[in-house]
Structure formats: structure tokens, C-alpha cells
Image (cartoon, coloured by chain):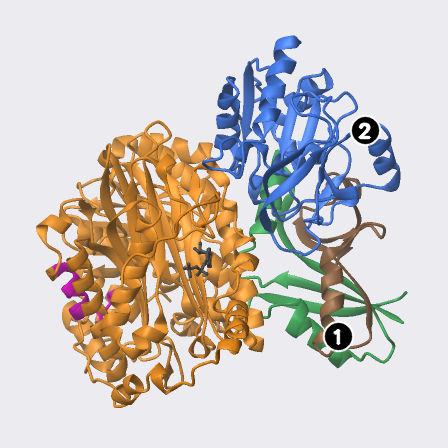
Chain colours: A orange, B blue, C brown, D green
């Protein structure tokens, strides 16, 4: 039977598998305190996923504040949306706004490289779409184990094919990325995906559900059992032997780029027709996230009839429907008088759309399942007031020894060995041509790619009549960052900044994807804290703000963490892309070669 | 010159095809897959992309779209039709062009700047080129290997209906290095590479592709 | 409701890069004795009882397979 | 020489965009009555007589299928 709020009230002592869902004792106790009773299965599913490290930023929040604290009003002057929104947005002039963000899909890409990477691209593209923008291009900073390790042969081709298939099929040119090999990534490849989009300034859509009586419409793919591996512990009792116990489900989502392409065009038409008040993509935490975040950011409550959600699998429980990570779905807030027009646009694009609820004047998120209440919570406690940890921070004992072990200890090559050394370096995996990878990515589609691989940064034309464009680069050297996280993060920033500047664009904003080991390891937290400080201080010095980012913790095998990898993305603006500076020397005889800097 | 550019669900290069038409001083007319309507255009471009996701077989679903009934009828009456990449696959599935396109022999999607040799400058889409000229345009496809049985290949070669051939190493395993072919009357052309991505050296490797759209202008004006 | 399987295979004279790739990889993975591999598609359909064999053949011939390069086989299976 | 068929299908709970695309297209093409379609891969192998069932299962499990998202069936067929 369904675990309703009524049932939960009458069975306060029923044991719940909160530990299996990743909640700590005190976190579970706090949920009981907030609700004044035990949570229902559906509520427990919601809180557990929204309070996870990935969704709540519980270990990183106290540090990320530093980005906001160090951003001055002047740095903020071009920023239309910043940290806390789905993606940062900057005003680039002529009425154009640019939104861009990087996100990690590391673990799923290790389990199933092709689908993990594909759905990583799909997810970041929906983030950009949810800002009201047309996605324009993608980039993919990647990290793998040693090039000759057998598992790299499984992971790398799969990841590259997945990034390629999804991006190519969406018609988004791939304009850059990174491929780096290091032993620490062997059990933890990093698949970071970046997307950039553009819109007119007045078309910015923010994720919030406001306006009592406005309708909540779920549109896009059907909801299935994707990625609910963890939550299946809640389901085991509800399936008797005749139905067959639901086996432990793979936590893998399969992407459908065609559906996403149609979803993009459909959404853009909905925006154009001004049929959307607020919008949210369905990311990692599915409907749990979309409903609680929309309600939490709005000015009222929300009521959702969960049984209306179109399903792909039979016998799904409310907890499963809320937790499903099925891809290619969006949730919109629509004025009642616009619902018919909204549905008509969806029908044109053959996109399934279902009214699943409405904004209420209360302050609760109430979710029903066949008329019975299964969730009744204050939405902020789910989405924005999760636990916050001040994790212990400790400079690693070996840091001094590591720093003392400088290249000075290495033997110098003799003069006649230099040529050989240069050849060996040129052929080494970290310096060799990336063509095997980049050949699998469409860089031409839609005809606005001004620069792509092998240029220092990607460049996209935004406006064909004015020739305004943007440049983007991502960088990070994990080895430098391991040696000195503060300076390492600044070097990543400086490199991306230089890469953008050398193409002729003016850097204006920064995003990041902070890939680290376990936050429960004080040494890792030290690296994290130092990297954040370094990046923020560097940005303040350069005068450009961090507009958003993503944190990926727990990238480690056993007790060995990956190299600290704060991938930094820099966005630049160029007012006439025809004046871009391509990479390369030697186009004409007689050119003079100048070295700038020390 | 009014040139229809079809959009199927999953079409990607329609904006590029329309831009190329504009660069050749034509008017690009958007055509929607679900309409039985060519809007009185002088020619049609079936652009690249992944119609319906191309999950079954490239072009297999798109060829049944209502607009394709009209395209087939118009093509049979001599209207110039150009299929680029997915568009070529759709025209082959629709039997407007012989043969079929299969997975690249190395199984990877390939995006690269590709030299092509113009073998036939007698079609509605290639008169602006010199016969034997070499042009550089992007190729970007996962299923670009041209296949046909011996008789069909002999017929194509014998009648000079191979329009473009890959120069250098074969990028996808195409029979006879075929990059593009034409119908018996020279009005329908299909090719895997993308001339519409090579109309401006700012955003493509060259502007070598523009010749195809200018050729069409001549064909329509002189018709 | 009837269950129907349609198998679609590349014609013998048509290049089969996917099957080829599998065949080439197997010895490298330590599997010997596999002489040839061909790779095609396998469809499982659930169809209403009144869908007859002629219709199924038409679906296979005009849609699921491209007869220029592929052969197909339809068979009904026990549920 | 023995002939072996391996069918690899997406697991029932896993999204199958390919099958979905076919299922959605059929009514548009005028074919009614097909309720569900799932699309997978079909391999035809010719193997030496000493390749045993355990080896075939291992080839299917470790190479032809991705057991995280796919199920597989191996069967020997008459030549
Ligand atoms: N995974 C990738 N995806 C797309 N482009 C990539 C990827 N990896 C590298 N590139 C591109 O290839 C080019 C060379 O990369 P790299 O050798 O890392 O250059 P650099 O050291 O100058 O940053 C750059 O244009 C870069 O953006």
C-alpha cells in the first residue's frame, strides 16, 4: 500500500531505510523535526536526494560563499544571474545575454561511458535552455587514467562517442575541451560538460513558481525507472512475489538526443510565444528537485498530482516517480489562460505535455497520489535549507615534501638528447594531437563557429548582422594544483583567460567545475578551500566574476583521491568576430616572432 | 529564385542551407515536414541532421513524411533537388537516388575538412565548377559509406553520374570513393559532404561550397 | 496480442563494418575460433492478433529493412 | 563449423529510443496494431566446433552486450 502522510502519522515507529539512502542519523532526525512526524517513503526519497552532496552542496557551501563575498559591485555590473541560478548569465552588449555553465558527469561515465557522457551533455544543455536561452555550443573537459591502461580503452572511446553522439545529434558544435591523462583518474575519469547559450536580455527566464493558480506542466519524455537505483530499497516491500521483486536497478540513464532536440525547439517556441512564467529542467534529482526548487524559489506553495505523470514503466511508486532521473524532461509554470496555447505548441513538436499541478497560496509543497497526500513539506527545507557542514580542513603532511621535490633534482638532458626529448614529449599522450577525439565532434553545425579545435579557445558568432561573438576556453592542470591548490587554481584561471584573450576577445566572466576527492578527508577539504580562495582572489584581481559552477566530490578510488581538478571556464566577448586572431604562425614569409612577458 | 529548405524533427543544418541560399542571392523558403506543400518553390534542399534521431536507419523515417511525397513528385517532373548528408540518405531511402549509405568503415563519426573532386559539372547544382576541380568542404557523418550493387555502380560510372569523389584517403569506406551522385536527368544531387558549411572562410574551411548554390541560380534563371 | 521477431541483416555482398570490427576484436580479447561475424538488427514487436503475415512482411520490407542493402526474416514467437 | 546467433536487447526498464522511434512512426505510415517495439542487435557468428557454450556466453556477456543496460541470448542454429 502507498505510504501516505496519514499512514506515516499513525506509524511513527516504522523503521525506515534512511541510511541506505545516504542520510546520517542527525539528518534523519532533522527531517522528523521539520515535519513533526516520520517522513513518508516519498518524502524520504525527496529529502535524501536533495540533501545529497551533489544537490545540496553541504560540504562546499561554506567555502563557495567566498566567491560571492569577493565579487565587487563593479565585477557584478554585467551579471544578470549568478551563483544559485541554473546557470550564470552576463550581458554582452547590443541587447544580448550569454549563459554558460560546466557540469560534471564523472561517476556515471565510469559505470557506462557512452550513456554517462551522453546524458552529461544532455543535462548541461537543459540547464542552459532553462535560462530561456538557445544553446549554441558545447565543450568537454575530460580526464582519463593512463592512455595505455586497459580500462582507459573502455572508458575513453565510450565517453568520446557519447559526447559526440549527443552533441552532434542536438546540432551543437563542439568548440573545445581538454583531454588529460593521469594515473589518479584511472578509477575516476572526469567527464565535465560545458554549454553556452544566448538570448535577448529581456527573455531571461528564472526558475521559480509564482502566481497563485498558475499551472505546473511537465513536458518531454515519459518517466521511467532510470537512475533510481538507491530508491529501490523503498520499493522492495511493495512488490510481492507474484509481481516479482524489483531487482536492484542499474543507476544508468539512457539518453535520447532526438527527444532533447525536439524539446529544445519546442521550448524556444514556447519562450518566443511568451507562454512560460517560470521553468526548470529535470536534472539529477528529477521531479523531487524540479518541484521543490520551483516552489521554494516562488512566492507561494505548490500542489502536484503525481499520478498524472506519464510513465514508461508499470507499477512505479510515488517515491520512484519523484526520484526518477529519466532524461529529456522540463517543468514549466504557465498562466491558466495560456495552457491551451502551450499544449498546442507541444503538439506541433510531438512533445508529451501534462498538467500535473498548480501554484497555491499556501507555503507547502503538497503532492498527492490518487487523491491521497504522500508529500506535505515546506519546500525550502527540501531545496534550499539542507544540511551545511564545516568539514575539518588539514594541510596534508606530505605537502612540504612534495613542494621541496622540485625539478632541480632532475638530471638535465645533454644537448644531443634534446631533440629526442622533444620528439618523445610531442608523442606523449598529454601533448599529442587530440584529433582522434575532436574528429568525432561536429564543429560546423549551424554555421556560427568561428574558432574551434585546434584554436586556443572556441569562438561563436552570436549575431550575423553585427558580427558580435563570444570566446570560451576551459583549463586546469591538476598536477600544479596538487603542488599548490591556491596557485594551481589561479594558473587554470590565467591559462583560460589568456586563451580567450589571445583570440582577440575580452574576458568577462568565469565558470568552474571543481572536481575533488572525498570531502570527509581533511586533506581534500584543504585542497578545496585553497583552490576556491585562489580562484576567487584571482578573479577579483582580473576583475571578472564567477557566475556559477559545479562541485564534484568523492572522486577517489579507495583512499586515493584524484589530482585536485578545478576546471575553470572563461567567457570572453568580441565585438566583431571577423577580427578574431587564429592560432598559428607562419602564414606569410617575413613575419616577426615576438615573445611577451618574462 | 525561391528555394525550399525542409525541416524534419531532428534536422540541424536547415539554417546553414538557408544561409547558403541567401549568400547566392536566393530566397530560402522554410518547408515543414508535416505539410503537403512546397509553397511554389523553384528548387528544394533536403538538409543535414538526424531526422527522427536516425535511430532505425538514416533517413528511413523521414522519407515517409508528407512533404516528401511532394518532393518526389516535383523531382520526377524535373525540379532541382539537393540532398546534403542526412538529406542524401533521405533521397536514397526515397529511391530518388540509387544505393544506400552505411556506417563508416572505421565506425566513428568523422568531422573533417575534405577535398572533393568535381567529376560532373553538368548537373543543376554543379555548373559553376570546372570539371576536375578540387574543392575543400566539411564532411561530418557517421554513416557516409556509399554502397550499391555492381550493376548500379557500373551504371553510375558509365553514365557519368558520380558528381563528387573523395580525394586522398577514403574517409568512410564509400564504394569507388563516391561522395555524391546525381539522378539520370542531372536534376537531383545527393552528397555526404556539406557545401553549405563552406560558403564563407570565416565559419568554414573555404567558400568552395557556394558554387553549388550559384549553379542552382543559373539553372533556375536559365530554365 | 502476438509476439513477433524481425531480424534484419546486411546482405552478404554488402560491407559489414560492425561485424568486421567484432570479428577483428575477438582474438585480441583472447577469444579464438570465431571465424566470421555479421551484425544486424533485432526487433521485438507486440502486435494485435489481427495483424497478418502479409502486413508484417510489408513492415519489414518497406520500413524495418532497406532491401537495397539488407535482408530480413519475420517470425512469430510463443509469448 | 557451427552457426551461432546472439541477440542483444535493451533491458526492459531501460529507455529504448530506437524502438520508440519505430513504434511512433508505424501508425504514421499506416500500419496499425503494433503496440510495442524494442530494437536490439542481432549477431550471426560462425565458430569452430570446439568453441563451447561457456565461451559463447562469455563473448556475449563481456563483449557483444553491455550487461549494465542490455540482456542477451545465445543460441546455436542448424547450418
Ligand atoms: N575533449 C575535447 N573536446 C573538444 N575539443 C578538445 C578536446 N580536447 C582538446 N580539444 C581541443 O583541441 C585543441 C588542442 O587541445 P590541447 O592540446 O589541450 O591544447 P592546449 O594545450 O593549447 O589547451 C584545443 O582547441 C582544444 O579545445
Judging from the image, what secondary structure is the residue with disc 2 in?
loop
Instruction: Name the quadrant of the N terminus of chain B.
Output: top right
- Taking depth in this image into account, of A583 and B21 the one nearest to the observer is A583
Question: In the picture shown, does residue A5 fall above or below A287?
Answer: below
- Taking depth in this image into account, of A457 and A343 the one nearest to the observer is A457
- Taking depth in this image into account, of B175 and B33 the one nearest to the observer is B175
Q: Going 56% across and 53% down the picture, which residue do you hit?
A: A440
Quadrant containing ligand 1 reads: bottom left
Q: Distance between the residues labelled 1 and 2?
A: 43 Å
Q: Going 72% across and 65% down the picture, which residue do you hit?
A: C22
**Disc 2: which chain?**
B
In the rendered image, the residue lying farthest to the top is B222
Q: Quadrant of residue D40?
A: bottom right
Dot 1 beta carbon under 8 Å from ligand 1: no
Q: Are marks 1 and 2 on the same chain?
A: no
Labels 1, 2: front one: 2
Q: Give the range drawn in magenta.
A: A56-68
- Residue A66 falls within the magenta-colored stretch: yes
Image coordinates of residue B216 in percent, x first then y, are 62, 19
Q: Residue C27 carries which label?
A: 1
Amino acid at each position: 500500500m502507498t505510504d501516505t502522510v496519514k499512514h506515516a502519522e499513525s506509524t511513527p515507529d516504522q523503521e525506515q531505510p534512511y541510511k541506505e539512502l545516504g542520510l546520517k542519523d542527525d539528518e534523519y532526525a532533522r527531517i522528523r523535526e521539520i515535519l513533526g512526524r516520520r517522513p513518508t517513503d516519498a518524502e524520504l526519497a525527496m529529502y535524501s536526494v536533495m540533501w545529497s552532496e551533489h544537490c545540496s552542496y553541504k560540504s562546499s557551501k561554506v567555502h563557495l560563499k567566498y566567491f560571492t563575498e569577493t565579487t565587487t559591485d563593479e565585477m557584478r555590473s554585467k551579471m544578470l544571474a549568478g551563483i544559485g541560478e541554473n546557470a550564470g548569465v552576463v550581458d554582452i552588449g547590443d541587447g544580448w545575454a550569454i549563459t554558460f555553465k560546466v557540469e560534471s558527469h564523472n561517476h556515471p561515465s565510469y559505470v557506462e561511458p557512452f550513456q554517462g557522457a551522453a546524458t552529461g551533455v544532455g543535462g548541461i544543455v537543459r540547464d542552459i535552455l532553462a535560462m530561456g536561452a538557445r544553446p549554441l555550443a558545447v565543450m568537454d573537459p575530460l580526464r582519463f587514467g593512463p592512455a595505455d591502461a586497459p580500462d582507459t580503452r573502455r572508458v575513453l572511446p565510450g565517453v568520446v562517442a557519447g559526447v559526440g553522439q549527443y552533441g552532434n545529434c542536438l546540432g551543437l558544435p563542439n568548440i573545445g575541451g581538454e583531454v588529460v591523462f593521469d594515473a589518479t583518474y584511472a578509477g575516476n575519469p572526469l567527464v565535465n560538460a560545458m554549454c553556452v547559450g544566448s538570448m535577448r536580455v529581456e527573455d531571461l527566464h528564472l526558475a521559480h513558481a509564482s502566481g497563485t493558480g498558475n499551472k505546473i506542466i511537465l513536458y518531454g519524455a515519459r518517466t521511467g525507472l532510470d537512475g533510481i537505483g538507491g530508491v529501490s530499497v523503498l520499493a522492495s516491500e511493495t512488490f510481492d512475489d507474484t509481481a516479482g521483486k524489483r531487482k536492484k536497478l542499474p543507476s544508468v540513464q539512457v539518453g535520447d538526443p532526438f527527444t532533447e532536440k525536439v524539446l529544445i525547439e519546442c521550448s524556444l517556441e514556447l519562450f518566443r510565444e511568451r507562454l512560460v512564467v517560470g521553468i526548470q529542467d529535470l536534472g539529477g534529482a528529477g521531479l523531487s528537485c524540479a518541484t521543490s526548487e520551483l516552489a521554494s524559489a516562488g512566492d507561494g506553495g505548490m500542489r502536484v498530482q503525481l499520478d498524472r505523470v506519464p510513465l514508461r514503466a508499470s507499477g512505479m511508486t510515488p517515491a520512484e516517480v519523484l526520484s526518477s532521473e529519466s532524461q529529456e524532461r522540463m517543468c514549466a509554470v504557465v498562466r491558466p489562460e495560456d495552457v491551451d496555447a502551450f499544449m498546442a505548441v507541444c503538439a506541433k513538436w510531438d512533445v508529451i505535455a501534462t498538467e500535473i499541478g498548480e501554484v497555491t497560496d499556501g507555503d507547502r509543497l503538497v503532492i498527492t497520489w490518487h487523491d491521497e497526500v504522500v508529500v506535505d513539506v515546506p519546500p525550502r527545507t527540501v531545496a534550499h535549507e539542507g544540511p551545511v557542514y564545516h568539514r575539518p580542513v588539514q594541510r596534508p603532511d606530505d605537502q612540504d615534501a612534495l613542494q621541496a621535490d622540485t625539478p632541480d633534482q632532475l638530471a638535465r638532458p645533454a644537448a644531443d638528447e634534446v631533440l629526442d626529448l622533444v620528439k618523445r614529449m610531442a608523442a606523449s599522450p598529454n601533448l599529442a594531437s587530440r584529433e582522434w577525439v575532436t574528429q568525432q565532434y561536429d564543429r560546423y553545425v549551424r554555421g556560427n563557429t568561428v574558432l574551434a579545435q585546434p584554436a586556443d579557445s572556441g569562438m561563436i558568432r552570436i549575431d550575423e548582422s553585427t558580427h558580435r561573438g563570444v570566446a570560451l576556453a576551459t583549463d586546469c592542470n591538476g598536477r600544479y594544483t596538487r603542488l599548490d591548490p591556491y596557485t594551481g587554481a589561479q594558473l587554470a584561471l590565467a591559462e583560460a583567460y589568456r586563451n580567450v584573450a589571445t583570440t582577440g576577445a575580452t574576458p568577462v566572466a568565469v565558470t568552474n567545475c571543481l572536481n575533488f576527492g572525498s570531502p570527509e578527508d581533511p586533506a581534500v577539504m584543504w585542497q578545496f578551500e585553497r583552490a576556491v580562495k585562489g580562484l576567487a582572489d584571482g578573479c577579483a584581481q582580473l576583475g571578472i566574476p564567477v557566475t556559477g559552477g559545479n562541485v564534484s566530490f568523492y572522486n577517489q578510488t579507495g583512499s586515493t583521491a584524484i589530482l585536485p581538478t578545478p576546471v575553470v571556464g572563461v567567457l570572453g566577448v568580441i565585438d566583431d568576430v571577423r577580427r578574431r586572431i587564429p592560432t598559428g604562425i607562419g602564414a606569410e614569409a617575413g613575419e616577426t616572432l615576438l615573445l611577451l612577458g618574462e | 529564385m525561391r528555394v525550399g529548405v525542409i525541416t524534419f524533427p531532428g534536422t540541424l543544418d536547415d539554417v546553414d542551407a538557408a544561409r547558403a541560399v541567401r549568400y547566392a542571392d536566393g530566397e530560402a523558403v522554410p518547408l515543414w515536414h508535416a505539410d503537403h506543400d512546397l509553397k511554389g518553390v523553384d528548387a528544394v534542399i533536403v538538409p543535414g541532421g538526424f531526422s527522427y534521431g536516425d535511430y532505425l536507419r538514416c533517413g528511413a523515417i523521414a522519407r515517409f513524411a508528407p512533404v516528401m511525397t511532394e518532393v518526389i513528385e516535383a523531382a520526377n517532373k524535373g525540379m532541382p533537388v539537393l540532398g546534403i548528408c542526412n538529406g542524401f540518405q533521405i533521397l536514397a531511402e526515397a529511391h530518388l537516388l540509387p544505393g544506400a549509405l552505411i556506417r563508416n568503415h572505421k565506425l566513428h563519426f568523422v568531422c573533417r575538412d575534405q577535398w572533393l573532386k568535381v567529376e560532373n559539372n553538368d548537373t543543376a547544382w554543379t555548373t559553376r565548377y570546372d570539371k576536375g576541380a578540387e574543392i575543400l568542404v566539411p564532411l561530418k557523418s557517421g554513416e557516409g559509406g556509399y554502397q550499391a550493387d555492381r550493376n548500379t555502380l557500373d551504371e553510375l560510372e558509365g553514365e557519368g553520374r558520380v558528381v563528387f569523389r573523395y580525394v586522398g584517403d577514403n574517409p568512410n569506406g564509400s564504394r569507388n570513393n563516391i561522395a555524391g551522385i546525381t539522378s539520370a536527368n542531372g536534376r537531383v544531387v545527393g552528397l555526404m559532404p556539406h557545401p553549405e558549411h563552406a560558403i564563407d572562410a570565416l565559419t568554414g574551411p573555404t567558400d568552395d561550397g557556394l558554387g553549388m548554390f550559384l549553379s542552382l541560380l543559373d539553372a533556375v534563371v536559365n530554365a | 496480442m502476438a509476439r513477433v521477431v524481425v531480424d534484419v541483416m546486411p546482405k552478404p555482398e554488402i560491407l559489414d563494418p560492425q561485424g568486421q570490427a567484432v570479428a577483428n576484436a575477438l582474438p585480441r580479447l583472447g577469444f579464438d575460433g570465431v571465424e566470421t561475424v555479421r551484425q544486424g538488427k533485432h526487433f521485438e514487436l507486440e502486435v494485435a492478433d489481427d495483424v497478418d503475415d502479409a502486413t508484417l512482411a510489408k513492415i519489414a520490407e518497406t520500413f524495418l529493412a532497406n532491401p537495397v542493402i539488407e535482408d530480413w526474416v519475420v517470425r512469430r514467437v510463443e509469448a
